[in-house]
Amino acid sequence: MLADTPGIHHITGVVRDAQQNVDFYTDVLGLRLVKQTVNFNDKFTRHLFYGHETGSVGTVLTFFPYPAEDDGRIGKPQISTAALAIPPGTVGYWQDRLAAHGIDTDGPFERFDETVIRFTNPDGTQLELVTAKSSIKPWVDGPVPTQNAIRGIHGVTLLSTNIYGTASVLEMLGFDLLDQEGDRVRYQSAGDRATVIDLLDRDVAFGREGAGSFHHIALRVPEKDQLYEWHDLFRERGYDVSRVKDRHFFHSLYVRESGGILFELATEPPGLTSPTEADTPGQQLYLPPWFEEDRSMIEDQLPPLELPTDSESR
């Protein structure tokens, strides 16, 4: 039986330089590199995952680095912004921290009773830090003091070519209309983390996927069997939906809704880290079994990457 999705699983973007990406998300934002693997559709491209200590659902940002990628352009239909949760009272700390790393910020400003600061990563990806309560415990051994550390994903902002079509899909997935401020319409799921999706009802130019853009947003599905039910429901309603795919860390499917946003539905288990690698996630290139025989060739083709150790982060 289908159940409403409880919230966001992960968010995936495209960048140009893997080393610059690692340095920004680990050294500046204080997230943990919890997995480095490859794009399962392109084994000579890295796939980098950042989150809290174990990279549980609702904490993870992932990126594909393509060194020759053209710049992206924010516009419809896209995920325009990813928002990360920070504890109330820490905006000043984050403004100072970002400024110390040469990063300009907009804000702070108030939105839906939250305080927000906005900035970009080195590729121009739009990010926000939002004061919000969160059930997520931060990574305690990172470079950011625990009391100030990021508490996972807060939500995303979408630019749709058909806001009513996108809203309909959100409601089908279990998100409820919560509020509206100006041209920003807020939907929220009933989960305990990463529950916010905002739709911007504004006239903007079409975007272009590339470095600095987000590729897709993944939503949580408790069990694999439900993916097949979602697949059949989307097909019955005329959506462009993929088959169920084995992503090794989870199973998922992709659906492109009528507003142009690419959603992934991803199962919560088994997760990104195993007990045997809990102390050193992300330190070694992980390959799924079907790529293992090509490990030497893959490692030779990938650009070198200098990784932080947890002891260096403290």
Image (cartoon, grey):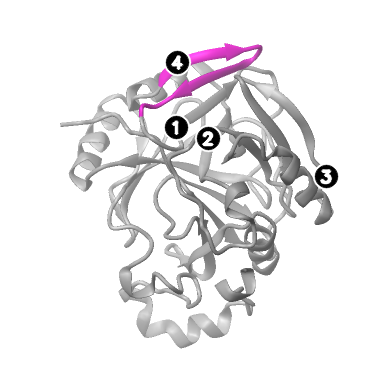
Contact check, label 4 and label 3, Cβ < 8 Å: no
Q: Which residue is mark 1?
A: 195
Report the residue marked by disc 2.
155
* Disc on the earlier residue, 1 or 3: 3
Question: Looking at the picture, how far across and down is residue 34, in whole percent?
Answer: 48, 64
Residue 299 visible at all: yes
Residue at 42% over, 64% down? 40
Please give the name of the residue rendered at 65% of the width and 54% of the height, measured from the top-left corner: 29
Instruction: Compare marks 4 and 3 and give the one earlier in the sequence.
Output: 3
> What's under tag 1, amino acid-wise?
Thr
- The alpha-carbon separation of the residues under discs 4 and 3 comes to 33 Å
User: What range is drawn magenta here?
Assistant: 176-190
**Residue at label 4?**
177
Local secondary structure at mark 4? strand
**Of the residues tagged 4 and 3, which is closer to the observer?**
3
Looking at the rendered structure, the secondary structure element under dot 3 is loop
**Sequence-wise first label, 1 or 4:** 4
